[in-house]
Image (spheres, helix red, strand yellow):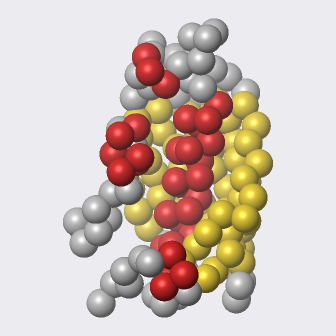
Amino acid sequence: MQRGDFPNPPFVSALGFELAEIGDGRVVFRFRPQEFMLNGLGVLHGGIAAAVFDTAVGCAALTVAPHDKAAITMDLNVRFFKPLTIHSGTARCEGEVLNAGRTTISAAGRLFDASGRLCGHATSTLALVRPPILDMPTPE
């Protein structure tokens, strides 16, 4: 995705998540909270935070997955510490692989506001599956 070999998933583009960094077992996404992302209390909706966590840990898993496999979320556990609002500036979500096995990958995510305050944390287990199940292209 970062090289442009594959398009961003439509919802990633719609939410404005931008892949900022990619490495072995680690990715960073950035996004700016927008008004449509807020819940009734004026803070980032938990579903938006879960979406960026899922995106970050999933992409981090893909950096270590075998080329003939895709990583599918089995579970995602999210904990919130501080709220994000439209005044929080550009948020950063880091995804990092904790352990890569033959059939599953464990990963964690951390969500920060523009001043570097930790706003949330997530853990996830992802299953490694063959892409044709998902009708996904494989890189050449």
Task: Examine the image and state in which quarter residue 84 appears.
Answer: top right
* Quadrant of the image containing the N terminus: bottom left
- Image coords of residue 70 (percent x, y): 53, 77
Q: Name the side, left or right, on which 52 lies relative to 89.
A: right
- Check the image and name the residue furthest to the left: 4
* Residue 68 visible somewhere in the drawing: yes
- Image coords of residue 129 (percent x, y): 61, 82
Against 5, residue 29 (above or below) is above
Against 2, residue 29 (above or below) is above
Against 40, residue 113 (above or below) is below
- Image coords of residue 21 (percent x, y): 38, 56
Which residue is more in the foreground, 40 or 5? Answer: 40
Q: How many marks?
A: 0
In percent of the image, x 52 and y 54: which residue is there?
A: 55
* Quadrant of the image containing the C terminus: bottom left
Task: Examine the image and state in which quarter residue 90 appears.
Answer: top left
- Image coords of residue 29 (percent x, y): 44, 47
* Residue 89 visible somewhere in the drawing: no
In percent of the image, x 63 and y 20: which residue is there?
A: 83
Against 29, residue 46 (above or below) is above
In percent of the image, x 54 and y 49: which residue is there?
A: 94
Q: Name the side, left or right, on which 95 lies relative to 8.
A: right
Task: Examine the image and state in which quarter residue 35 appears.
Answer: top left
